[in-house]
Image (tube, rainbow, N blue to C red):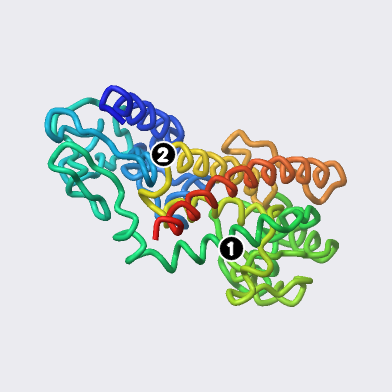
Amino acid sequence: MTPEQWLPLAAAHAERADALTEVWRAARSAGRKHAIEDFLFTYYPTRVAHLRRWHPGAGVALVLPDGGAEAPGATPDGDAPDVPNAPSATNAPHADDRTTWRWHRTTGREIVTLDPDAFLADRGDTVRYVRGLLSATSSRAGIFGCFGLHEWAMVYRDREAGRDQRHPLPLRLGHEGTDAVVEANPVRCSHFDAFRFFTPEATSRNQLQPSRATQVGMEQPGCLHANMDLYKWCLKLGPAVPGDLLLDAFELARDIRWTDMAASPYDVSAYDVAAVQIETPHGKAEYVRRQRDFAQRSNALRERLLRVCDALLGAQ
């Protein structure tokens, strides 16, 4: 790709990343925690700088302008300023030299591309694991009967046991009301990285008992957290993932996170969010409606990420 082709794409990518992180950056700039979006930057190893950095993906060579002047909005070490109010991209000359980036190879100082052999030497096991997990998940039908009870199971009987709850937000139904919802509904959580945060009293209530060893065999596209994790797998595959796929996965994870908290036992009204009252028939129906939409979006992203893995492994 010539500079005239890819520099506008890099600039548009940085602007889109700024828009997607605007709420979180505003809260951080004001010194406030954000009970919904902080998760995207703590549970996942997210830096705004990395989100703003555009990659074309494997197999695409970039012709650098002016003997190496680089992409918009970055500092000389390759990272955009990771500050809450990071500005939109600018075309500062020599701002970001891709010729020094890890896993990249150059022809002179003018053409740079991802070196799949170097990448696979470091990340080959990760690529193969991610491919196996995504392929297995795609092969299964979604399960739409969990109703987001994983969040409720994470605080089940907390007060009774003298534990602090996971979030500073108040419980919408109080402690006893929250416990009653868990006891009145079957818990069917298939995602280990949610199940491992269940309280000890809730663990035995789960009809499924996922583990790290069974993750590939149990992950399914109806699970909100499995679908959020597509963003994690994009991060793991780094520069092999095209920029639009990375931001599509982040946007899906962000949208799911808002529903995950709306359907949780917490009172999120301070964030102008209407609760998805999964303890009611109407709330359950609304949860499933959103869950099916997320499953459809995630399946499309999963197929795109599988193609990234296949392209890398086919380059060996």
User: Closest to the observer: 249 or 303?
Assistant: 303
Res 137 → quadrant: bottom right
Mark 2, secondary structure of its residue? helix
Give the residue type that dot 1 points to. Answer: Leu
Residue position marked by numbered label 1 in the rendering: 133
| Comes first in the chain, label 1 or label 2 | 1
User: Closest to the observer: 302 or 114?
Assistant: 114
User: Closest to the observer: 172 or 106?
Assistant: 106
Disc 1 residue crowd, few under 14, some 14–19, many 20+, Cα 10 Å: some
* Percent position of residue 286, x then y: 78, 40
76 versus 160 height, above or below: above
Seen at 24% across and 54% down, the residue is: 102
Mark 1, secondary structure of its residue? helix
Seen at 43% across and 69% down, the residue is: 125
Horizontal side of 143 relative to 5 (left or right) equals: right
Which of the numbered marks, if any, corresponds to residue 243?
2
